[in-house]
Image (spheres, helix red, strand yellow):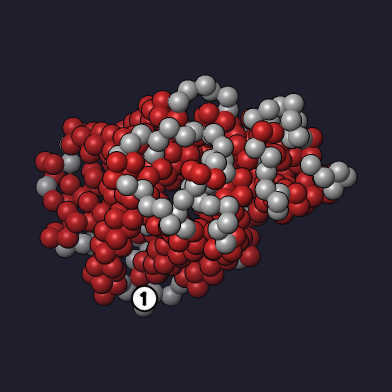
Amino acid sequence: MVVASAEKTFEVERKGIDWITDEERHGTPRRLFWPWFAANASFFTVAYGVFVVGLGLSPWQGALAVIIGLGVSYPVVGLVALAGMRGGAPTMTLSRAAFGVHGNRLPTLFVYLSLVGWETISVSIGALATRTVLARIDQGLASTRMVALGFALTVAVVIVVGIYGYNLILRVQKYITIAVMATTIVYFALIVPTLDFSRPAAGGGIALFAGGVSLVIANGIGWTSGGGDYSRYLPRTSSPRAVAGWTAVGAGSAPLVLMLFGVLLTAGNPALAAAAAADPVGAFAAALPTWFLFPFLLATMLSVIAGAVFNLYSSGLNLQALGVRLPRWAAVAIDGVIMVVGGVYLVFVTPSFFAPLQAFLIVIGVVTAAWSSIFVVDLWLFRRAGYVPEALYDPRGAYGRFNVAGVVSLVVAVGVGWGLVTSQDPNLRHVLGYLLGDAARAGSIGAANIGVAVAFFVGGLLYAVISRRGAR
């Protein structure tokens, strides 16, 4: 095993979407656990459990929705990581095999928007939590100036680490994981005794349960587009099972514990769902003793940095995959500027965090779900022996300019998926759910947002049928 030296750790990574040669590969699959665990070990993940129950589910329904949703989505992330090891290139560069070099720009654009959205959400959560926690300590500290300072420090760290790249991210994520999980354990010990489980809990119907599962799947599937970005440096002799397994376990174990805890919190404190809609992390500080507020805030900032760095790194690679001819570090810097602008809107302009979050998750989640299933089916059918390096960068190569099977499957799956989802956002309410009647859109079927799951299955199945006419 080759371990990155201190010099390389603090050296700006020069590799972008370039092919990673065998001489440049190093490490073992076990190393994938830390960055993936850190990216998901956030109090925001606890909020997901709150949101699931907030749809109208009972605690046991919410817990089951979390288990099913994670069990469906995170193994897909592991399979995409396997492609990264086999292919030696970032995920959305490998995706050209399924869509063609030029045809791949369509899914890459949506995935790029997804990653920029997620990194923006991460830093916004940190700023909102800063405001809430500082208000608990002293109302005078919760000024716009202090919130802006916390926001600026967070985005500065995220951009710097993202610019340095792969080796620094792997090292930083490990220590962030340890610090955040230690704080989380203390949080559990402080909060659980204060919860009241004597209230009767009403459950939701099948449609609402499906909505909870869809919400969790949208969270997990959102990580697939970066699945190969960290495994691409592993030697091609690495165990495929270990690559997929360590990625899936690292990425999924933290959400399993934290989302289930969110379900538990909501069962013991039903008012938490409404508070979390406005401030997805700061709401959890309400019942904390004063002495623990600063460690909680520090852990929150570290966790959002971990998630944002992960997405910022991948979004920079995706900007290159779109055809922007810039060094990787410059692409990361551009995405950082976009992240700052979006974060300012979420923190200082919009009145509710949950409404734009839900709209973003559903719209992008449908596209990501359709793309990820096509990618995995292509991997399973045609890429067991790996990828052709030259063809990933040359539209005249084996993968061509457009793979009709991939592009058609994506467009159809997204069209069906968007027609089966709804949104409370006034800007999207009238353009989604067009396959549902008025009664269905307003009822539990519309709330279920089954379009995410439908897009996943339609995209993969359609691609398998069309592409079987000729191996690519």
Q: Residue at x 69, y 33 (%)?
A: 391
Taking 326 as reference, is 408 left or right?
right
Check the picture and name the quadrant holding the N terminus: bottom left
How crowded is the residue under tag 1: few (<14 C-alpha within 10 Å), some, or many (20+)? some
- Tell me the SS state at disc 1: loop
Q: Farthest residue in the top direction? A: 325
Q: Position of residue 337 (x, y in %)?
A: 37, 27
Q: Position of residue 462 (x, y in %)?
A: 79, 47
Residue linked to disc 1: 197
Q: Residue at x 50, y 73 (%)?
A: 60
Q: Residue at x 58, y 28 (%)?
A: 322
Taking 324 as reference, is 372 left or right?
right
Q: Farthest residue in the front direction? A: 23
Q: Position of residue 138 (x, y in %)?
A: 11, 47
Q: How many labels, in total?
A: 1
Camera-side residue: 17 or 62? 17
Q: Is residue 1 above or below residue 228?
A: below
* Quarter residue 340 falls in: top left
Question: Can residue 429 be seen in the rendering of this structure?
Answer: no
Camera-side residue: 441 or 121? 121
Check the picture and name the quadrant holding the C terminus: top right
Q: Farthest residue in the bottom direction? A: 198
Taking 295 as reference, is 275 left or right?
right
Q: Position of residue 233 (x, y in %)?
A: 50, 47
Tell me which amino acid carries mark 1: Phe
Question: Can residue 472 be seen in the rendering of this structure?
Answer: yes
* Quarter residue 312 falls in: top left
Q: Residue at x 77, y 46 (%)?
A: 463
* Quarter residue 141 falls in: top left
